[in-house]
């Protein structure tokens, strides 16, 4: 059975915002403010911003956030299908610093799908439970939101969104993809350095894998 989710999981488990509450109120629906769509090259993800810092003075939790977007001529329905096929995501997001190992559906209700997600990020397996919800206006747009339900010893405040929109760029029909991701992970200076060095390439890899997966739909 197919479900909605996505947590691109290809590094979604390691991207955070210095203040967890800020991530929960981030406005990620619509085209990223100030974006000139004509400046984006097809199938070429662009980082909008990213940040890595310690979450507090204890220096035991690393807070991270990142936003990346892209355009592709791959139809929105195919891009959405990848994000909607929760069980199939481990076959799509399986390269780079973060790899999706498994996604197990626990339940489905009015608030969304509850899923247990296991991934490997920066050499460490991380498992957490999240609620995945959708706001759909297909075939024009889709917004998928992922929120961790309960913090654990490894990760907390997971919040990620995928926004898709059908757009016209220089007269060509395209799909706009915007991925925002934030959370906090346990770790000290060494892990913080590893995340800082890889956060941008990890998010770019996530979008590339999404587009490649959508083209194969």
Image (tube, rainbow, N blue to C red):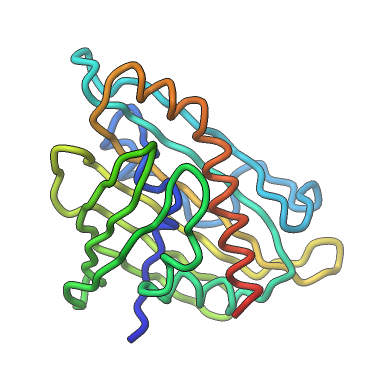
Q: Position of residue 133 (x, y in %)?
A: 32, 67
Question: Looking at this rendering, what residue extends furthest in the right direction?
Answer: 170
Residue in the image at 33% along x and 29% along y: 63
Q: Quadrant of residue 134?
A: bottom left
Residue in the image at 55% along x and 34% along y: 49
Depicted 57 relative to depicted 209: above or below: above
Q: Position of residue 96 (x, y in %)?
A: 52, 46
Depicted 24 relative to depicted 16: above or below: below
Q: Is residue 32 left or right of residue 127?
A: right
The quadrant the N terminus occupies is: bottom left
Depicted 167 relative to depicted 77: above or below: above
Q: Is residue 177 left or right of residue 90?
A: right
Question: Looking at this rendering, what residue extends furthest in the front direction?
Answer: 123
Depicted 37 relative to depicted 108: above or below: above
Count all numbered tags in the image, as a single digit: 0
Q: Position of residue 93 (x, y in %)?
A: 48, 59
The quadrant the C terminus occupies is: bottom right
Question: Looking at this rendering, what residue extends furthest in the bottom direction?
Answer: 1
Residue in the image at 58% along x and 59% along y: 209
Q: Is residue 64 left or right of residue 156?
A: right
Q: Is residue 140 left or right of residue 103?
A: right
Q: Nearer the viewer, residue 61 or 178?
A: 61
Residue in the image at 31% along x and 64% along y: 102
């Amino acid at each position: 059975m197919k479900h909605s989710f996505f947590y691109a999981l290809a590094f979604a488990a390691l991207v955070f915002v210095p203040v967890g509450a800020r991530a929960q109120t981030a406005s990620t629906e619509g085209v990223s403010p100030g974006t000139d769509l004509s400046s984006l090259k097809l199938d070429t993800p662009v980082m909008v911003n990213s940040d890595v810092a310690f979450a507090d003075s204890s220096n035991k939790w690393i807070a991270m956030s990142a936003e990346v977007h892209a355009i592709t001529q791959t139809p929105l329905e195919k891009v959405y299908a990848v994000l909607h096929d929760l069980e199939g995501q481990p076959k799509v997001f399986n390269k780079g610093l973060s790899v999706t190992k498994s996604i197990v559906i626990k339940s489905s209700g009015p608030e969304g799908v509850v899923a247990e997600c296991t991934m490997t990020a920066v050499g460490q397996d991380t498992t957490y439970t999240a609620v995945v919800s959708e706001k759909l206006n297909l075939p024009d747009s889709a917004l998928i939101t992922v929120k961790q339900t309960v913090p654990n010893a490894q990760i907390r405040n997971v919040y990620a969104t995928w926004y898709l929109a059908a757009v016209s760029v220089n007269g060509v029909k395209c799909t706009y993809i915007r991925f925002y991701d934030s959370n906090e992970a346990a770790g000290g200076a060494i892990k913080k350095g590893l995340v800082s060095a890889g956060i941008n390439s990890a998010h770019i890899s996530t979008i590339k894998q999404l587009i490649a997966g959508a083209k194969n739909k």
